[in-house]
Image (cartoon, rainbow, N blue to C red):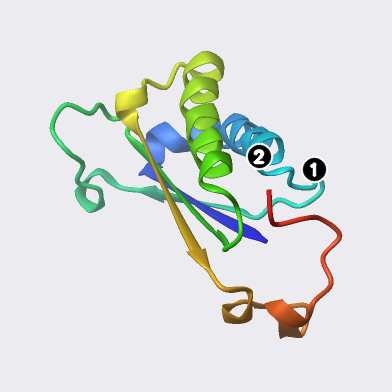
Amino acid sequence: MAQVKIYGLKDRLDPVKKELSEVIHSCVVDALSFPKDKRAHRFFGLEAGDFYYPAGRTERYTIVEISMFEGRSVEAKKHLVRLLFERAQSELGLSPSDLEVTITETPKHNWGFRGQPGDEIGLDYKVEV
């Protein structure tokens, strides 16, 4: 299971939502062997007064937060991060300095979906990659 939140300035994020979602999803599928039909992305477009970002970044500064079950290897997570930087730059022209990625892992039992705790649900994909 993975949930993705994307934050950025509304006027910069809105025009690229679809393309950015495609880039993120392709990276998650490739790096984590995630099913192609599983996508949970939420975009948070903020007004300039609600989004302060570090010096040296542009108005395209984007934060991608990925929350997922624990169990992926360090190598798989690093591969995901590298793919996100590479594809965001090559497919969207988003500079690596304007992208920040965080991955938060939690035990399956801390999730609940389809009416059950996450550790009691049979998944149709492997988490341990």
SS category of the residue bearing label 1: loop
Point out residue 128 in the picture as x, y percentages from the top left corner.
Answer: 69, 55
Q: Quadrant of residue 54?
A: top left
Foreground residue, 67 or 60? 67
The answer to which of marks 2 and 1 sits earlier in the sequence is 2
- Tell me the quarter of the image containing the N terminus: bottom right
Q: Residue furthest bottom?
A: 116
What's the residue at 62%, 34% (across, down)?
Answer: 27
Question: Label 2 neighbourhood size at 10 Å, few (<14), some (14-19), many (20+)?
Answer: many
Q: Quadrant of residue 32?
A: top right
What's the residue at 86%, 60% (across, down)?
Answer: 124
Point out residue 56 in the picture as x, y percentages from the top left corner.
Answer: 16, 26
Task: Locate residue 5 relative to residue 8 in the image: left or right.
Answer: right
Task: Locate residue 36 relative to residue 86 in the image: left or right.
Answer: right
What's the residue at 39%, 35% (across, down)?
Answer: 11
SS category of the residue bearing label 2: helix
CA distance for labels 2 and 1: 8 Å
Could you tell me if the residues under marks 2 and 1 are in contact, i.e. CB atoms within 8 Å? yes
Relative to 50, say whether 117 is above or below: below
Foreground residue, 43 or 31? 31
Disc number for residue 25: 2
Type of amino acid under label 1: Lys
Q: Which residue is mark 1?
A: 36
